[in-house]
Image (cartoon, rainbow, N blue to C red):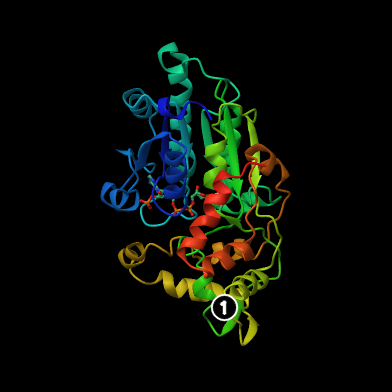
């Protein structure tokens, strides 16, 4: 690693699903983390890790590089992870502002900031100064027809063009983790029927793989920079196989499987979206569930994970292993994650 005790990492989008895992892994590795969040109250309850500090940000409105430059200087930031991403223009949020214009303002500010020797320090040019969390789907030939991956692609391309700003773009596949996130497989495993959509393959990746992997990209001997890493899980699976695998690992069995037509799944999301926005936000789950998200879910997305594993020297996490260990109880699961954290291939 770089000398973590002397490095300040700004994680923008530190709450939600992936954000707290990033903050935790950086903290465990010894970095000082500044959590960029839009809701301080939520952040304080979600990010109960020692030594973290908080910075209020809003990517829907913080479009001016000077605003970011001031923050980088004030907090003496060494590196940034931009984890913010929204799948739809939900509520008052603009997809363009949140996914493109504000991160671009932040990265441009980082570029200017590093021109000052006081802040650029004596750092290796091979360690990324910024990590952008992008998404799968950006590789689809018709990605531009889907506003979410299209906005991420736009951001990735603009970041790659910024001079003198060492970066890594991580493109995760669908992310999962027991009891957290947008895909609670342990709840789905409890259902008597395996309701699935589509027959395409995806490669779900464990949340800790992304968080530990991103943290390792900041290590001292890292030589991976100015590149895109496709963070896919180790095994291509259909949704039907994903649900079945998790359920079998938890010693449960579906009574039968039933394919849900896309149109029906879309209709359900439309009905859900009719509920008051306040209620949806309160439950914090449905901002990504709309008819277009359903289409994206059934598109399939696979890819080789060897660059990702080589760069991070991670042991890949297999879905069946994860749920088998989770099924054994909290201690076994926490030992399993600790083993991933400590193993370097
Ligand atoms: N989950 C997946 O399967 C998946 C797959 C591929 C890529 N990704 C990417 O991974 C990243 C994290 O995803 P996630 O699933 O953890 O999403 P998430 O739970 O929805 O979290 C997104 C983060 O962005 C923050 N955010 C949203 N709008 C903001 C704004 N206007 N200003 C400041 N912060 C804002 C959220 O803050 P609040 O907590 O206040 O809402 C949260 O911290 C995203 O960039 C996403 O595109 C996710």
> Looking at the picture, how far across and down is residue 63, in whole percent?
39, 35
Judged left or right of residue 309, residue 69 is left
> Looking at the picture, how far across and down is residue 86, in whole percent?
47, 51
Read off the residue under disc 1: 264
> Looking at the picture, how far across and down is residue 41, in whole percent?
26, 50
Mark 1: secondary structure: helix
> Residue placed at 37% from the left, 26% from the top?
72
Disc 1 under 8 Å from ligand 1? The reply is: no
Most extreme residue toward the bottom is: 255
Query: Does 299 sit above or below residue 259?
Result: above
Judged left or right of residue 6, residue 134 is right
Judged left or right of residue 219, residue 108 is left
Q: Is residue 46 visible?
A: yes
> Residue placed at 68% from the left, 48% from the top?
139
Q: How crowded is the residue under tag 1: few (<14 C-alpha within 10 Å), some, or many (20+)?
A: few
User: Which image quarter is the N terminus in?
Assistant: top right
Pick the residue in front: 41 or 122. Answer: 122
Query: Does 287 sit above or below residue 267?
Result: above
Query: Does 288 sit above or below residue 242?
Result: above
Query: Does 236 sit above or below residue 195?
Result: above
User: Which image quarter is the C terminus in?
Assistant: top right
């Amino acid at each position: 690693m770089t000398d973590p005790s002397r490095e300040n990492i700004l994680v923008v989008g530190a709450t939600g699903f992936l954000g707290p895992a990033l903050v935790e892994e950086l903290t465990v590795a010894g970095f000082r983390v500044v959590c960029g969040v839009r809701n301080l109250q939520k952040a304080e309850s979600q990010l109960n890790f020692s030594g973290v500090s908080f910075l209020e940000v809003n990517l829907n409105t913080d479009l001016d590089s000077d605003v970011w430059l001031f923050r980088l200087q004030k907090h003496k930031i060494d590196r940034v992870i931009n984890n913010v991403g929204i799948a739809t223009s939900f509520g008052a949020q603009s997809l363009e502002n949140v996914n493109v214009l504000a991160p671009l303002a932040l990265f441009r500010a980082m570029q200017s900031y590093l021109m000052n020797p006081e802040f650029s320090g004596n750092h290796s040019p091979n360690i990324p100064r910024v990590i952008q969390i992008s998404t799968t789907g950006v590789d689809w030939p018709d990605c531009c027809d889907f506003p979410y991956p299209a906005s991420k692609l736009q951001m990735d391309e603009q970041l790659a063009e910024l001079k003198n700003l060492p970066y890594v773009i991580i493109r995760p596949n669908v992310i999962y983790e027991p009891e957290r996130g947008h895909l609670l497989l342990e709840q789905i495993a409890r259902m008597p029927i395996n309701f699935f959509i589509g027959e395409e393959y995806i490669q779900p990746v464990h949340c800790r793989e992304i968080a530990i992997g991103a943290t390792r990209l900041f290590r001292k001997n890292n030589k991976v920079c100015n590149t895109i890493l496709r963070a896919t899980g180790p095994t291509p699976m259909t949704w039907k196989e994903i649900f079945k695998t998790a359920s079998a690992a938890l010693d449960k069995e579906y009574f039968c499987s039933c394919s849900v037509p896309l149109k029906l799944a879309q209709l359900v999301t439309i009905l859900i979206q009719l509920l008051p926005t306040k209620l949806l936000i309160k439950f914090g789950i449905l901002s990504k569930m709309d008819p277009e998200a359903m289409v994206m879910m059934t598109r399939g997305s696979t890819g080789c994970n060897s660059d990702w594993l080589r760069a991070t020297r991670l042991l890949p996490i297999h879905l069946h292993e994860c749920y088998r260990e989770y099924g054994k109880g909290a201690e076994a699961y926490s030992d399993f994650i600790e083993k991933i954290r400590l193993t370097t291939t």
